[in-house]
Image (tube, rainbow, N blue to C red):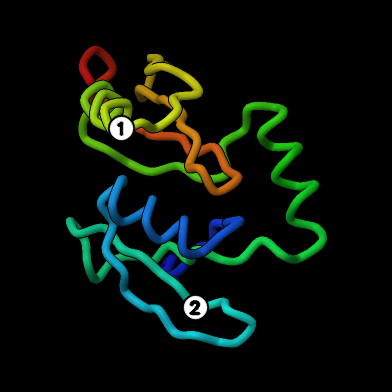
Amino acid sequence: MRIEITSIFVDDQDRARKFYTDVLGFQVRHDVPFGNGASWLTVVSPEWPDGPELLLEPSDHPAVGPYRRALVADGIPLAQLAVDDVHAEIERLRDRGVTIVQEPMDIGMAIVAVFDDTCGNIIQLLEAKTDQGEA
């Protein structure tokens, strides 16, 4: 068993596509229209193009809004994305106008930070430490 696709609910697929590709740097893997202006829209990391896909899924199901609002209100990220250097990535995102919700913080086994994806979610960046003393 392996993780193949995981979803992030987004308010607007066009805006999400631009943010996740132009700002974050992912690549579109699939963009298959399925009616009502929505698509099966997935992105992948250019570092792992055959790896797991992130489905940018429309957030129109009635349960999604209350769920995401509760997560944001409690400061709980909807998803986590791995990076090699959280500090550098946060500066890159800040330079691109991204709202940083939580500055980099050492939590012991990792360094984490949180940003707003402009599509209704907060997303955590995670830099795993290679050993307890060094990131």
Disc 2 to disc 1, how far (Cα)? 26 Å
Report the amino acid beneath label 2: Trp
Quadrant of the rendering where the C terminus is positioned: top left
Residue identifier under label 1: 93
Q: What residue lies at 46% left-to-right and 31% top-to-bottom?
A: 115
Q: What residue lies at 36% left-to-right and 25% top-to-bottom?
A: 110
Above or below, 78 relative to 2? above
Report the amino acid beneath label 1: Leu
Residue 80's quadrant in the figure? top left
Front-lying residue, 68 or 15: 15
Above or below, 5 relative to 116? below
Q: What residue lies at 43% left-to-right and 62% top-to-bottom?
A: 54
Residue identifier under label 2: 40
Please give left or right for residue 59 compared with residue 121 in the image.
Answer: right
Query: Dot 2: few (<14), some (14–19), or many (≥20) neighbours within 10 Å?
Result: some
Residue 129's quadrant in the figure? top left
Residue 100, image x and y in percent?
44, 24
